[in-house]
Image: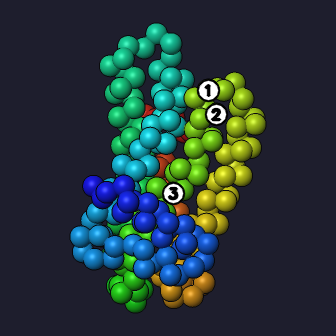
Amino acid sequence: MPSGEEIQRYLSGAWRLMTGRQDGLALLDLSADGFWTSFSAIAVALPVLLATWVPVANEACGPDATLAIRLAFLGRLAAVDVATWIAPLAAFVLVARPLGIADRLVPYVVASNWGGALAAWLMLPVALAGLFWPDAGDMRGLVALIMLVVALVLFWRLTNAALDKGPAMATGVFVGSRAVELASLLMLQSLLGVPPS
């Protein structure tokens, strides 16, 4: 796990990429070790992810469920989210060489991981609303939609800056990644009996 100072630098780099500044790559560790270390961004995002899982588990399990049942359900939610985080990156690893962008593999994966952690934290207000105001359904849904659109725009900009192959390639990779993410999400939710959230 990187140090707190390193995590702050990586998140700053991801933010610079999300605002379209390619110099954000200089703040990321693009070595082989940095590639694997970037997956610790999942742990950085874990507090926010947990805040989104708890209301879903409470609703799905009902008020009479035991702690063991709730923890088992939280485990299934975690499996779904971690798999949908990793699946688009794994798909990119498979298609990078045929697309002629293998040289951008490490920058894209590292930037995507740290950008994913940052995007998770941007969704914190929605997660907190689910925890503390579970009856604010419509308002929470609207805020979630707005934040999702903002996160998607920022992530497209990160993709464009990390790939450095032009907007057309960035759009193709971005759309393909989101399609793999959605397909993984729907398949795993169905397999693990997790309701759509």
Q: Is residue 156 above or below residue 80?
A: below
- Residue indicated by mark 1: 132
Label 1 and label 3: CA atoms lie apart by 22 Å
Looking at the rendered structure, the kind of residue marked 2 is Ala
* Residue in view at x 57 percent, y 29 percent: 131
Which residue extends farthest left? 33
Comparing 102 with 20, the one in front is: 20
The quarter in which the C terminus is drawn is top right
- Residue indicated by mark 2: 129
Task: Give how far across and how far down residue 168 sits, in percent.
Answer: 59, 84
Disc 2 packing (10 Å; few <14; some 14–19; many ≥20): many
* Residue in view at x 24 percent, y 74 percent: 32
Q: Secondary structure at mark 1?
A: helix
The answer to whether residue 10 of the structure is visible from this angle is yes
Task: Give how far across and how far down residue 86 sits, in percent.
Answer: 37, 58
Looking at the rendered structure, the kind of residue marked 1 is Phe
Q: Are circles 2 and 1 on residues that touch, CB within 8 Å?
A: yes
64 sits to left or right of 106: right
Residue 79 placement: quadrant? top left
Determine which of the numbered discs, if any, sits on residue 118 in the image.
3
Q: Is residue 166 above or below residue 126?
A: below
Disc 1 packing (10 Å; few <14; some 14–19; many ≥20): few
Looking at the rendered structure, the kind of residue marked 3 is Leu
177 sits to left or right of 147: left
Q: Is residue 35 above or below residue 97?
A: above
Q: Are circles 3 and 2 on residues that touch, CB within 8 Å?
A: no
Q: Secondary structure at mark 3?
A: helix
* Residue in view at x 50 percent, y 23 percent: 58
Task: Give how far across and how far down residue 49 sits, in percent.
Answer: 47, 42
Determine which of the numbered discs, if any, sits on residue 99 in the image.
none
